[in-house]
Image: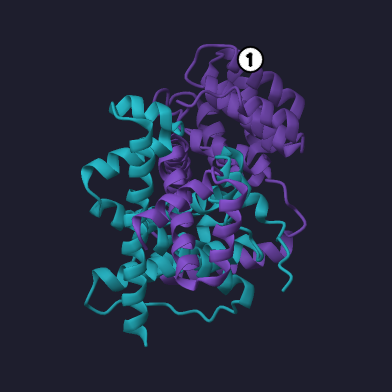
Chain colours: A cyan, B purple
């Protein structure tokens, strides 16, 4: 399957570079539509602002992880992400009836796929973070240091242990996470089938 | 997976295995599904942690930047949009579409978008002056051509930045650019409360003449404590 990168990839690259001019352009060109949608669906400008910021941070993270290659227009992709996030939020927070102004958007396949990928990325991140919180303090500290400092010799020095120990410990801490995540995956697939 | 496996995973990612060990590892990857699945997660976790802790400062800088851009964006918008009801949106949208149909070729911002001269209130202070009253009425009725000679008479007798400002705006409305700009420049170099307003109208004069570059240059000199600074910013954004 050929996946052609859309020229709107400039917005993704701009976000990854924290380029203010690009971010301002996104606000000017694409944000008003989202605000309009949220306001028309039981929200207000402040709530819209939060949704937009969260989606921007998600895109930043995904772009930084180098897994965000846009194959559809940014406009549709960004709007759909924000819209779905907002709908999730109102579903979560209210049990009374909410008015949802369901306009029939024609969403093409590549946009839908892009959105699904980003949402999957988000879910994974959340799962990884959740599991990380389950780790013991020692593991957490060691991993934080290892990935922030990079040089394992320095990490060993900082923690006042040997190089061999930190290397082994790091492998096992990530190993523990790996195991938990596999168990979760199994659990999930059991639930689905 | 055993502890040993995780240690090898890490060594493989750090490229520390000997050629032979590496070959064995890759062979196992291709043959053992569970082994491969575990390794895939292990690898992804490494990327995640690297992103999370290795780029923490970048992420914080990004969050800060987004917050400030968002704040500015919504501040500018708020002054323009005053609690629309859904049906008003519908009207606004159809008006916008209509305007778009008429002006779709006109991408640049126009003078009319920003030209909102305030009303003049001269006569409370000196109700005796006939010309002041006439100038005020004409100006507020947007009959600028009529107002100009009244202003000129007043200025001959008693020159004040306030009258000069309204005079200059009238000139500009009447397309007498050079005269308008001379007067605005004079107010701008003074110290009156009309200083920033004059500068703003100087920019609008350039806008009306479609001199976008000089318009932008003037806008950039207006300090952000100017009362209509949101308009300044909006115009700057549109000019970009």
Locate residue B95 relative to residue A100 in the image: left or right: right
Q: Nearer the viewer, residue A175 or B173?
A: A175
Q: Which residue is mark 1?
A: B186
Q: Determine the residue positioned at 70% across, 37% down.
A: B207
Whole-percent x and y of residue B116?
55, 42
Farthest residue in the top direction?
B190
Q: Nearer the viewer, residue A71 or B184?
A: A71
Whole-percent x and y of residue B163?
55, 23
Q: Determine the residue positioned at 67% across, 38% down.
A: B173
Q: Nearer the viewer, residue B115 or B25?
A: B25
Q: Is residue A67 visible?
A: yes
Locate residue A97 relative to residue B233 in the image: left or right: left
Whole-percent x and y of residue A2?
74, 70
- Helix, strand or loop at label 1? It is helix
Farthest residue in the bottom direction?
A193
Whole-percent x and y of residue B58?
47, 37
Q: Quadrant of the C terminus of chain B?
A: top right
Q: Determine the residue positioned at 59% across, 29% down.
A: B200
Residue A127 occupies quadrant: bottom left
Q: Is residue B56 visible?
A: no
């Amino acid at each position: 399957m050929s996946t052609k990168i859309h020229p709107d990839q400039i917005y993704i690259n701009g976000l990854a570079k924290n380029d203010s001019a690009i971010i301002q352009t996104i606000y000017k060109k694409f944000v008003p539509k989202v605000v309009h949608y949220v306001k028309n669906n039981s929200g207000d400008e402040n709530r819209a602002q939060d949704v937009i910021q969260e989606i921007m941070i998600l895109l930043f993270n995904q772009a930084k992880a180098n897994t965000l290659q846009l194959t559809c227009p940014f406009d549709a992709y960004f709007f759909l992400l924000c819209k779905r996030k907002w709908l999730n939020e109102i579903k979560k927070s209210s049990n009374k009836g909410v008015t949802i102004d369901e306009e029939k958007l024609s969403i093409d396949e590549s946009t839908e796929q892009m959105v699904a990928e980003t949402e999957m990325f988000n879910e994974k991140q959340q799962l990884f973070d959740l599991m990380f919180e389950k780790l013991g303090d020692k593991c957490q500290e060691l991993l934080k240091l290892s990935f922030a400092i990079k040089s394992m010799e320095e990490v060993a020095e900082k923690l006042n242990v040997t190089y061999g120990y930190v290397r082994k410990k790091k492998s096992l801490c990530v190993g523990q996470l790996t195991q938990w995540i596999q168990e979760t995956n199994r659990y999930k697939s059991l639930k689905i089938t | 997976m055993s502890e040993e496996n995780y240690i090898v995973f890490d060594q493989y990612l750090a490229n520390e295995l000997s050629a032979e060990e590496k070959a064995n590892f890759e062979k196992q990857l291709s043959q053992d599904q569970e082994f491969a699945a575990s390794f895939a997660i292990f690898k992804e976790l490494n990327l995640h942690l690297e992103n999370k802790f290795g780029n923490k400062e970048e992420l914080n800088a990004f969050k800060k930047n987004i917050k400030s851009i968002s704040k500015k964006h919504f501040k500018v918008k708020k002054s323009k949009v005053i609690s629309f009801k859904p049906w008003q949106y519908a009207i606004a949208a159809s008006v916008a579409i209509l305007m778009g149909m008429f002006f779709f070729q006109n991408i640049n911002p126009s003078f009319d978008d920003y030209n909102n001269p305030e009303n003049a209130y001269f006569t409370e202070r000196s109700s005796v002056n006939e010309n002041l009253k006439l100038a005020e009425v004409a100006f507020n009725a947007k009959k600028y051509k009529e107002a100009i000679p009244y202003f000129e008479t007043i200025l001959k007798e008693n020159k004040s930045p306030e009258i000069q400002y309204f005079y200059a705006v009238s000139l500009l409305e009447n397309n007498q650019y050079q005269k308008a700009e001379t007067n605005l420049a004079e107010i701008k170099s003074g110290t009156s409360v009309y200083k920033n307003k004059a500068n703003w109208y100087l920019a609008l004069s350039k806008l009306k003449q479609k001199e976008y570059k000089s318009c932008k240059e003037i806008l950039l000199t207006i300090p952000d404590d100017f009362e209509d600074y949101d308009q300044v910013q909006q115009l700057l954004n549109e000019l970009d």
